[in-house]
């Protein structure tokens, strides 16, 4: 039968009201205790004779609840009380909802007085002093329901939306949708419930922007339901959940006593329906994302950080396992069982634990909110036939966006920034300027969250594109700034504190506690510290995953590693494989044209002929091979391409092998000779203006048979041999026609064992 409100309220002689609820014999004292006890209330007054006091009891309860809510806000102040925190908006709307329902003013004023930042949110709670839902005596469309009890139930759900509970009704999709509304804007939630309860019709024109787009009209069967005795779905939940569901399924006959299968079919809500509802309700950038792989989980985590709400079309078995993990993993099901087990619930947070291959998730469903850590294989087996998340950004998240881009002013001073700040900074600089079409397209995708792309992913792609720009188009954006998922005052404070730590051991510990996963700034600072401590295994953990990094982040890692190796001294030694990695991934500040210019000087061959064309063709293949390995798009020409040390090594190695294929007596260079050859060539390019400044011009010297240094003679002979083969067209323009490029480049690594072949380079 449930409890009555009147038996929970005690009126003192001094006018004070106390709440006398209990849980398992223990007095309810906390904010959440009060809500749990009140959720068992099924009537306001214990005796019918006390019915005239019903509204007074509800008004008094509103005061008591708001007092406890104020205590709760005070205790959790650090979690929400900041003008950049979107929870400010939700709290303000929770208070306005109480005024809308009961007309309460005094308790609300006290909360606003203690937390003045709430006044930044536009509210009109004073207008409900007399004109409120509780004071209205008009009959309800749901004639068997009690207005006062509905108010009590809505107050509970305003303060904690997890109490919106479908119970045994098959309305999980609607339940998830309504949860989103209550979490985002509690006032809108109570307006929908009260309009449906009073009139049976609700047009969500304020969400959709025009009438008739998302119109709910409940059926008579739904409106005629008897009031719950506590064992079935609560009245307030029935009004909105079955109300929306019956409106959408008006051709299906609703019945409280309907067969279980019929109710299951009646309640089925596809993810496409939820997608449509979210769009109609004003959510932006609504997408469906398949959740059958690890990458999708990481994507969803980023979107939640970006302020997206997430509904998930999974299974009841999975939801039950998350809520009650002690019951063990779900049992195997056949296809029909998996179909009938479909369940839609809210994902509040999710992340993928790579180290343990687990999904860490927090969900809201069946009146509960619970976290769990699930092995990925269990997740994969139990997400169901659909297994799709419906994501959408609520229309009020621009509050959070504006807050996150406040650090835009610090972009020039810091080594890190948020992805939102980076995108906005670049957008402000470019302003649709010509020549930046690719970056403008990426910016447009970022601001629209096209195809569910998160800010972090978009910012990294934009950063890579900026790093590739030629010097004359380079933006006033700090080079290689660390774009990290989240920049909050707390994170800024922690980085500042770490900056002032002098002990290397303590600094490492503080950075590790901040979290290195997906935080390139933490990794950037840790690597030099690890190197100085000789903790190479920890560095190799970062390097093992380097292929999934953005191009710029890879360069940040390699530069940090190079710095760390320079700082090593004493007994700490740099491993040879680390030295080689640094050597191979050094990026130069010269382009292909500078390489060709130097080779033209060394050989005395004019630029622009077959030699130039052949070199460009081979170098383009080498560069595109590297870009393919990095997961980047190939380039069609070498204009503006900045070369890496590995590009020079691979080019020389490739040409060396091609000469050998045409002229077998020519022996391929050993690793040591190749390295010596390339280092001299690279130094010559880097010091082009200074090198040989006190010597005669190389071409002039060649004409005079001037004796070049021995290594330059070898370089000259090598490329003259290459030129002669180009000139005779013995090497085709397509690398694939002579030998597969990838095999050549991979073979370069295999053949670098010293002593395999004669290191001589002058053999013809």
Image (spheres, rainbow, N blue to C red):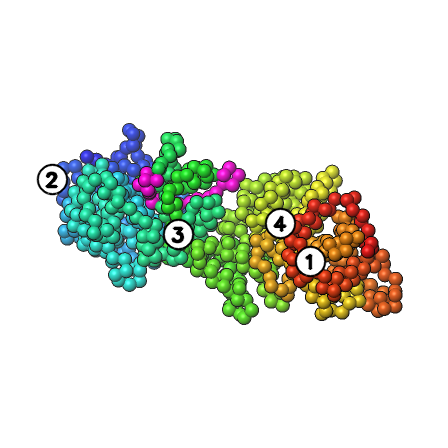
Identify the residue at horizontal 63%, vertical 42% (top origin).
Answer: 540
Instruction: Pick whichever, 380 or 656, lies toward us.
Output: 656
What's the magenta region?
Answer: 335-357
**Residue 733 shows in the view:** yes
Picture coordinates of residue 590 (x, y %)? 69, 62
Mark 1 vs 2: CB contact within 8 A:
no
Residue behind mark 4: 557
Picture coordinates of residue 235 (x, y %)? 22, 44
Select label 1 or label 4 by which is in front: 1
- For label 3, the SS is strand
Neighbor class of circle 1 (other Cα within 10 Å; few <14, some 14-19, many 20+) is few
Neighbor class of circle 3 (other Cα within 10 Å; few <14, some 14-19, many 20+) is many
Neighbor class of circle 4 (other Cα within 10 Å; few <14, some 14-19, many 20+) is many
Say whether residue 350 is magenta.
yes
Give how far apart the Cα atoms at labels 1 and 2 are.
89 Å
- Is 175 situated above or below 624? above
Say whether residue 580 is magenta.
no
Instruction: Pick whichever, 353 or 109, lies toward us.
Output: 353
Select label 3 or label 4 by which is in front: 3
Neighbor class of circle 2 (other Cα within 10 Å; few <14, some 14-19, many 20+) is few
For residue 238, side relative to residue 405 (left or right): left
Picture coordinates of residue 203 (x, y %)? 25, 58
Residue 588: give its label: 1
- For label 2, the SS is helix
């Amino acid at each position: 039968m449930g409890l009555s409100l009147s038996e929970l309220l005690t009126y003192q002689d001094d006018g004070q009201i106390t709440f006398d609820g209990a849980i398992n014999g223990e007095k309810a004292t906390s904010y959440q205790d009060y809500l749990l006890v009140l959720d068992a209330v099924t009537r306001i007054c214990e005796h019918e004779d006390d019915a005239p006091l019903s509204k007074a009891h509800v008004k008094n309860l509103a005061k008591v609840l708001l007092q406890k809510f104020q205590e709760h806000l005070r205790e959790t102040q650090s979690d929400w009380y900041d003008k950049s925190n979107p929870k400010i908006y939700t709290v303000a709307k929770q208070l306005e909802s109480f005024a809308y329902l009961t007309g309460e003013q005094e308790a609300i004023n006290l909360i606003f007085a203690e937390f003045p930042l709430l006044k930044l949110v536009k509210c009109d709670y004073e207008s409900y002093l007399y004109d409120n839902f509780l004071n209205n005596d008009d009959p309800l469309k749901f004639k068997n329901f009690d207005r006062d009890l509905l108010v009590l139930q809505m107050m509970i759900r305003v303060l904690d939306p997890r109490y919106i509970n479908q119970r045994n009704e098959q309305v999980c999709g609607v339940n998830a949708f309504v949860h989103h509304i209550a979490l985002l804007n509690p006032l809108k939630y109570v307006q929908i419930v009260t309009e449906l309860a009073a009139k049976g019709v609700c047009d969500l024109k304020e969400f959709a922007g025009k009438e008739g787009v998302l119109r709910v009209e409940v059926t008579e069967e739904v409106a005629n339901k008897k009031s719950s005795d506590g064992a079935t779905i609560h009245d307030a939940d029935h009004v909105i959940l079955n109300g929306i569901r019956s409106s959408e399924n008006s051709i299906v006959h609703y019945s409280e006593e309907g067969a279980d299968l019929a109710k299951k079919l009646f309640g089925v809500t596809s993810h496409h329906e939820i997608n449509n509802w979210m769009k109609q309700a004003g959510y932006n950038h609504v997408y469906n994302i398949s959740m059958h792989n690890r990458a999708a989980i990481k994507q969803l985590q980023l979107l939640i950080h970006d302020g997206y709400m997430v509904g998930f079309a999974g299974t009841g078995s999975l939801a039950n396992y998350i809520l009650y993990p002690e019951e063990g993993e779900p049992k195997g099901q056949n296809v029909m069982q998996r179909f009938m087990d479909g369940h839609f619930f809210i994902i509040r947070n999710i992340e993928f634990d790579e180290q343990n291959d687990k999904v860490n998730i927090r969900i809201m469903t069946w009146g509960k909110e619970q976290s769990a850590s699930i092995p990925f294989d269990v997740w994969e087996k139990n997400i169901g036939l659909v297994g799709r998340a419906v994501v959408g950004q609520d229309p009020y998240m621009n509050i959070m966006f504006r807050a996150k881009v406040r650090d835009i002013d610090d972009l020039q001073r810091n080594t890190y920034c948020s992805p939102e700040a980076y995108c906005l900074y670049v957008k402000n600089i470019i302003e649709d300027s010509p020549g930046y079409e690719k970056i403008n397209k990426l910016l447009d995708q970022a601001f629209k969250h096209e195809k569910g792309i998160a800010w972090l992913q978009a910012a990294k792609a934009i950063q890579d594109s900026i790093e590739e720009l030629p010097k004359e188009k380079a933006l006033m954006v700090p080079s290689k700034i660390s774009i990290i998922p989240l920049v909050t005052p707390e994170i800024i404070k922690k980085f500042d504190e770490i900056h002032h730590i002098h002990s290397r051991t303590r600094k490492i510990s503080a950075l590790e506690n901040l979290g290195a996963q997906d935080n390139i700034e933490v990794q950037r600072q840790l690597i030099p510290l690890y190197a100085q401590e000789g903790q190479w295994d920890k560095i190799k953990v970062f390097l093992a995953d380097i292929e999934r990094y953005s191009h710029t982040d890879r360069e940040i890692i390699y530069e940090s590693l190079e710095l760390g190796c320079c700082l090593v001294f004493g007994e700490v030694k740099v491993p040879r494989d680390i030295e080689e990695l640094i050597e191979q991934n050094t990026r130069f500040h010269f382009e292909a044209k500078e390489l060709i210019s130097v080779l033209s000087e060394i050989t005395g061959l004019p630029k622009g002929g077959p030699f130039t064309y052949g070199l460009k063709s081979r170098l383009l293949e080498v560069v595109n091979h590297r870009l393919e390995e990095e997961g980047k798009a190939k380039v069609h020409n070498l204009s503006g391409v900045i070369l890496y040390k590995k590009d020079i090594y691979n080019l020389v190695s490739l040409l060396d092998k091609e000469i050998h294929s045409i002229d077998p007596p020519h022996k391929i260079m050993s690793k040591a000779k190749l390295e010596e050859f390339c280092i001299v060539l690279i130094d010559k390019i880097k010091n082009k203006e200074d090198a040989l400044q006190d010597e005669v011009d190389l071409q002039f010297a060649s004409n005079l048979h001037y004796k070049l240094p021995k290594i330059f003679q070898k370089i000259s002979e090598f490329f003259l041999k290459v030129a002669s083969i180009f000139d005779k067209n013995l090497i085709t323009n397509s690398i694939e026609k002579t030998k597969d490029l990838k095999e050549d480049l991979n073979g370069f690594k295999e053949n670098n064992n010293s002593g395999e072949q004669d290191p001589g380079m002058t053999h013809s």
